Amino acid sequence: MATQRVRADLGTTREVVRVSVPLMLGMGGNLIMMLVNGICLARYSEDTLRASGPAVFAAGTVIVVITRTVGITRSYVAQAHGRKDRNATTEEGVNGLLLALLLAVALLAATPLMPWIAELNGQPPHIKELQSQFLILSTSFGAVMALNMALSSYFNGTARTKVPMTVALIGQGVGVLAIPGLVFGFYGLPKMGMRGSALGTLAAVSTMLAGYAICLPAGFFTSFFQVLGQGVHRNAERLWLRLRMGAPSGGGAGLDQLGNTSFVWLAAVLGPVALAANNVVVSLNYAAVVPPIGLALGCNVLCGNAIGEGRHDKVPRIIRVTLAVAGVYVGLIAILQIATPELLLHPFGLGNAHTAVAASAVDAARMLWTYAVAFMFSAIATAVLDSFGLARFGFLARVAVMWGVSVPTICLITLTNRGDESLLPVIWAVYSAFELVIAAVCFWRIRRAVVGLENGLMTAPAAKAAS
């Protein structure tokens, strides 16, 4: 019996590595592009350093609601693939693309509203103007990202994760060149500062969209037109169901990103030194949290395949292996954050920054490992909930913990200690603790779902719509 369990775990480990590592590498490329963007804005000017954190996070909050809503496609495709239903697998991918097109149009329509977000954070007018430059352009690359999410979800759901990895790395390579080129005016390109950051990102994600279009099988396009031919009423009913199932995931991700945005704004209450230091630390934090997202996506796919097969017993093994792989990566990053924060922060130009900013950033960087560990657990837990069709539970858990306790606690700390930049590491520790609470609650719900053999994506209405 013990031998069978060891073999099962080894088989699961191979499958997790096969599916998840390409996703992790793709997210690693995304990390490099994000770091290049953060470094460019930090080195361009002190004003862009101050404007970058709130602008990037605010834009990300809006975009992630759209992309994570579309991302429910991955779970639908994974379950259909687990049932070995090829036609249903392709049709689920098409449904995701239609949903992405609808939400992309809605995002573009919201472009005139984006500058209003810059008015909420209480920064000087010239900083708000820089933020608005980025925010106005963010809907363009956000709309493309929605389409990319739908197409990558199709490939990922069928466990063909090397395709999204390759497409992502090519697009990210374009971004790594385009962002500094457009920010600083390299290679004969115009020098555009904050606008250049957004346009460079647009160039990267547009390259990815072209790559996905090239890689799609011919049968996908045939299915696309067949689905369109089923009539407006049938498609509207199907898309409404997808929207209902995906919206809690998008809402939860949006609340998470909004929490991160409010965290950046609240850090500003501790003074300009804390704001500048925190903008750099937030960029550094990407190194710890972005690659594990790829592992979480792989876990989502494998759990979806298992649930589609009716093999709920596989889910705990998949989770354990994914946490072990993610733990190795996060552990290595944590050691670097604690032991060598100055080395990690050097590319952001802190050697030329005010001494107080550098010291504050180093202190906060040594506390980042707490959030990295907590986020690893919460990202994997929420991804698994999505594969069960339980995104709504993750959404409610995040609302209750983050907005009922975490953000109010941090708000209380900062508002009662205005100008005290020494508290920046403290608020990072508080933020991390409540993220771990969210993870614990989600894992409790996953255990219930496994025991009860639940599958929220194949309820009676869903089964009818899928037929």
Image (tube, grey):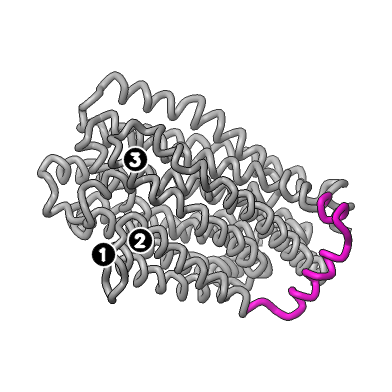
Look at the image and tell me in which quarter the N terminus lies. bottom right
Specify the label residue 250 is tagged with. Answer: none
Q: CA distance from mark 2 to mark 3?
A: 17 Å
Q: Quadrant of residue 361?
A: top left
Q: Earlier in the sequence, mark 3 or mark 1?
A: 3
Residue situated in front as seen by the camera: 120 or 344: 120
**Residues drawn in magenta:** 215-237
Residue under label 1, please give it. 184
Q: How many marks?
A: 3
Q: Amino acid at mark 3?
A: Lys
Which residue is pictured at 64% across the width and 70% down the height? 155
Judge from the rendering whether residue 181 lies leftward or rightward of residue 9; answer left or right.
Answer: left
Specify the label residue 128 is tagged with. Answer: 3
Q: Quadrant of residue 210?
A: bottom right
Residue situated in front as seen by the camera: 55 or 86: 55
Q: Label 3: few (<14), some or many (≥20) within 10 Å?
A: many
118 over 325 or under it: above or below: above
Q: CA distance from mark 2 to mark 1?
A: 8 Å
Residue under label 2, please give it. 196
Judge from the rendering whether residue 308 lies leftward or rightward of residue 252; answer left or right.
Answer: right
Q: Amino acid at mark 1?
A: Phe
Q: Return the x and y of residue 288 as percentages of the image width and height.
A: 37, 54
